[in-house]
Amino acid sequence: MAGRRRRRGAAAPPEPPARSGRRPCRLSGRRAGAAMGRAALLLLLLVATAGRAGVSAAGGPEVHSLRGSWRLGNGNGSVVLRGEVPGCVHTALHRRGLIQDPYYRFNDVMYRWISLDNWTYSRTFKTPFDIRKWQKVNLVFEGVDTVAQILINNITLGRTDNMFNRYSFDITSVIKEVNFVEVRFLSAVSYAAEQSRCHKAYSIPPACPPPVQKGECHANFIRKEQCSFSWDWGPSFPTQGIWKDVRIEAYNHYHLIYFSLTSFFVKSAQQWSLEIESIFDVVSSKPIAGLVTVNIPKLQMQQTFSVKLQPGEGSIVLLVNINKSSAVEAWWPNGHGKQTGYNMTTTFIMEAGYQIEKFSKAYFRTVELVQEPIPGSPGLSFYFKINGRPIFLKGSNWIPADSFQDRVTYDTLWLLLKSAADANMNALRVWGGGVYEQDEFYNICDEIGIMEDKSRPFIASSPTNGLESVKEGWLSQNPYDTHYGDTHFYDYSNDCWNWTVYPKTRFASEYGFQSWPSFSTIKKVSSTEDWSYTSNFSLHRQHHENGNDQMLQQIGHHFKLPQSTDPIKKFKDTIYLTQVMQAQCIKTETEFYRFSQSEIIKGEGHTMGALYWQLNDIWQAPSWASLEYGGKWKLLHYFAQNFFAPLLPVAYEDKGVLYIYGVSDLHADRKLTLRVVVHAWSSLEPVCTLAKDGVTVKAQSAVLIYKESINNLLERCRNCTRKSCVITFCLVGEGGLQSPMNHHFLSSLKDAVGLEKTHLSASVSQRDDVYIFVLQTTAIAPFVSLDVGRIKGRFSDNGFLMTEKKKVVVFYPWEPTSVEELEESLTLTSLVDVV
């Protein structure tokens, strides 16, 4: 993406510039054979700039936004309404009450007609300045979705065919005091089909998505959000609209149209530097000289450069060296240090008169993708060093937060990304079939320590064999070779509790299992007759072939399937079990990747990343997500908070022997105590306990800290069998250091002996801005789930194994609520409540 340049004149460059000067991220793909989404890059979301441009003296440009209400009409004029810009046709129709919520029931199919029609946005505007005073006036579209003809005063300015491009049109000679602007859209579905018909040289699969997705064909023939034609976790809504800002820009002499900054560390000089790139459009016929001053107050740094702008569009690149005596604090990923950023002002004072100021934030960090030989193993490593420190990447995969991008607000992004950080994630991989995310996405990632920018390592696809793929001419002989690069792994038939089915890979960039969202989320888009696992609605909402059956099959390995004669209870119980199953499956797989980071077994191992598929949902439907549409945490996300914890004991069993590893992301070795407790399912009193003191858990590694045959352990714990007992364990250190409590099941829970029907109760009280839930149980309760329906917020813990009479859980509300509301909405469920 480096080296992007804009074409002179009308249309924009092949890669879309970001408003705040950030270069767009590379995007990555999911599951082999799904066309455009496959070319990929493991993203470190580390982008450094943000900003607002300011003009501090007379003579600066006039910028006038055309946001707001436009006239919107369909192809034959039978539908005419007001539509907001930024926006799209679907949301305009919905806001005006002409259609229902597009996500309600079967509306994704019922409203196909919207995408098949050709819509036109138009409006009249008065020019807010004296046209004669300006040498150049541009009409700028930050985002047009997707295929359109742009006209002003009935003069065609140009055409658009790329949702992700910024388009700028010179209207100097055609703008009037009163103007009429039109954006005439062509159906993206029709356009893609026509492009496919015209392409005869060779086939480009797939022609169409699988029938289960209820989608549109030929998405790979259009530069548009691929999943808007459907995906296996999302609906088909090929939108039309002006999805980003549109404005008039008038200027004399010169205009700053792009600004970016990138930090890097020069090893030879042992010095931090910043590269600042600015792209100007110079309308003067002669070069324009001037001064650029860069000021970072916190680092007591100010440097001034002489520059000369050549006529036309061109860039200037400044190299700013940070004084070695300045104590620069590096930016660290979540869990590894602070996310220090430095406010920076860049001031342009040119001889033509006016002054431009750019306010941005500089972050200092280095990122290396290390691919080098590993002793005792064929192949190469594949891990990231941040600021010289190897970092195990913990996180997930990001998809678009909504089918309609104008509904994705800053608050939406903050809620989802903060939830990722709260679950101890430090990295997200932005999926390639979505959109180039907005600046706010990257700004939030910077603030909360989620890792991605232009100076970072690039790989040609994901999954990949890294350097080996390059060596093999970019086409790997074995794309799933665990000795190189990253891997994707999906297996819905084998028992997910069996860790031996998982690849001992260098880096796991995709893996996952489906679940249904909670009943309160489904209820918003369904009616009573839909509330069955086998209803038409449930089948329609599932876009993955045999997905609903695969979930039941996986549940059936270890749990009894619901048999209630009450259909709604049976549906709710099934939803609950899909979430328990998903959480336990991905816990098992992720813990396997984490404890594999420090060992090589039969040439495999040194796993240094676990990014499960997927973080968020695009609508209310079964999917691989851990966050439901709207942001509600599934049980998986609560489990992720634990299995991504910085300190964690992980257990697995092999040939009758129990192994417990101490996994640490901490930066120092720790002497800890391992506490192992064996409970009988029938009693809240422990059968036996073990405290192993002086356990050394090494910094940023996984080490074996306990090994014993299951038979020996059970013999020491009187009257315990595999079916009657369960093992829990945690690590405890000085100064309050403690890992989450973990568990290891000795048998399937459907075979558990002694599990009793428990009475679960909760009292709720308020403490400052949070709510305290005090839970009590009369017996051991597996997978205790607290649900407060539509009330937005999250718990401190959920889905846990309750082995004590009392447990305190904190609820963090995302909107105002009350003790009374929470008590009224609360549902408590555990495994023994499923009948």
Image: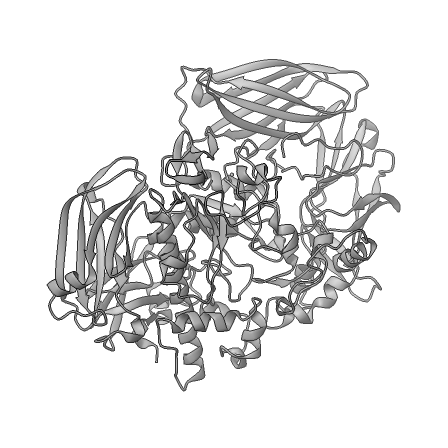
- Badge count: 0
Q: In the image, is 578 to the left or to the right of 709? A: right
Q: Nearer the viewer, residue 421 or 471?
A: 471
Q: Nearer the viewer, residue 707 or 365?
A: 707
Rendered image quadrant of residue 102: bottom right
Q: Residue at x 63, y 38 (%)?
A: 18
Q: Nearer the viewer, residue 6 or 143?
A: 6
Rendered image quadrant of residue 191: bottom right
Q: In the image, is 30 to the left or to the right of 351? A: left
Where residue 787 sits: x, y (%)? 37, 67
Q: Residue at x 66, y 60 (%)?
A: 91
User: Quarter of the image containing the C terminus?
Assistant: bottom left
Which color scheme did the rendering employ for the protein? one colour
Where residue 87 sits: x, y (%)? 67, 53
577, above or below 668, in the image: below
> Is residue 539 visible from the viewing direction of this image?
yes
581, above or below 156, in the image: below
508, above or below 336, in the image: below
User: Quarter of the image containing the N terminus?
Assistant: top right
Where residue 402 sits: x, y (%)? 58, 57
Q: Nearer the viewer, residue 302 or 112?
A: 112
Where residue 372 sits: x, y (%)? 45, 33
Q: In the image, is 612 to the left or to the right of 195? A: left
> Is residue 817 visible from the viewing direction of this image?
no
